[in-house]
Image (cartoon, helix red, strand yellow):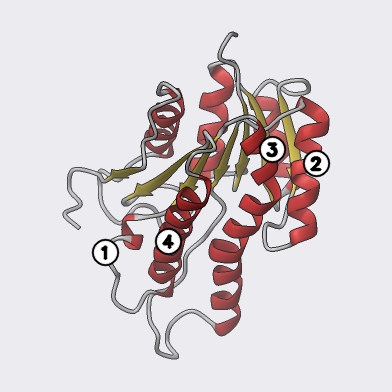
Amino acid sequence: MPDEKVILITGASTGIGAATARAAAALGHKVVLAARSEEKLEQVAEECGGKGNALAIPTDVTSWEANEALADSALAEFGRIDVAFVNAGFGGKGSFSKDGASVEHWREMVLTNVLGTALTIRATLDAVKESKGHYLLTGSVAGRVAIPGSLYSSTKWAVNGIGQSLRGEITGSGVRVTLIHPGIVDTPFWDNGSPIPDGLTDDDIANSVLYAISQPHHVDVNEIVIRPTSQGV
């Protein structure tokens, strides 16, 4: 296809990342899929057309070496990276008290949501600049409205800041930066299903990602905030 893009997606084994991969592949884009679970990644890659269309790279985004290997593998397979959807992340029980998530869970969440985002950007930056491409970062409504007691919310405020700092650094390079801020999405993020009856689906967020990507190159959709109709904040 004339507008075929090579789209690298972290957190691609389930939820928003997997839905975006499937939707992008259905439009004829090539996808590079990264997550920790090799088995789930391979399944999504097959759903995206398999060899020649989708590349599955097991990746721990908290590791610089793993991010470098991810970018190198994408370039070796497809020759370029047009879009980096920096989506890997997870949440935790919201409380700063000892009744909240464990310290170990906190550490891994901060490393994944914040450091992992920065490392993926660093590893792919030269390639995305070369293609005058596009970064999309998964933030959250919780990164715009602080959730009481939630360190997860704080990590998404950090992602918001990373996106704005990145845009400031690369202004004039032709690279676009979009922050995607979902509200409540019915994905594996929620252990017991969406806490509201009409939560967004992962496909709803995938559609938002593809909308931003599809805009004319001179149009940089800076932020998309998307909530279900029953979510007020």
Q: Do the residues labelled 1 and 2 touch (CB within 8 Å)?
A: no
Label 2 belongs to which residue? 72
Which mark identifies residue 161?
Answer: 4
* Residue most extreme to the front: 172
Q: In which quarter of the image is the N terminus?
A: top right
The amino acid type, in three-letter code, at marker 3 is Ala
Residue at position x 77%, y 20% in the image: 52
Compared across the picture, whether 172 is left or right of 47 comes to left
* 123 vs 135: above or below: below
Between marks 1 and 3 in the image, the one whose residue lies nearer the viewer: 3
Between the residue at mark 4 and the residue at mark 2, the CA separation in whole angstroms equals 27 Å
Q: Residue 143: which quarter of the image?
A: bottom left
Crowding at mark 1 (Cα within 10 Å: few <14, some 14-19, many 20+): few
Label of residue 127 in the image? 3
| Element on which disc 1 rests | loop
- Asked where in the image residue 109 lies, by quadrant, the reply is bottom right
> Mark on residue 145?
1
Considering only order in the chain, which callout, 4 or 3, is on the residue closer to the N terminus?
3
Q: What element carries label 4?
A: helix
Q: Earlier in the sequence, mark 1 or mark 4?
A: 1
Q: Identify which residue is drawn at 30% across, 70% down.
A: 147
Label located before the other in sequence (4 or 2): 2
> Spatial distance from mark 1 to mark 2, Cα to Cα?
37 Å
Q: In which quarter of the image is residue 148?
A: bottom left
**Is residue 222 shown left or right of residue 12?**
left
Q: Position of residue 42 (x, y in %)?
A: 73, 36
Q: Where is residue 187 in the image (x, y as percent from the top left)?
A: 44, 48
Residue 192's place in the image compared with 208, above or below, is: below
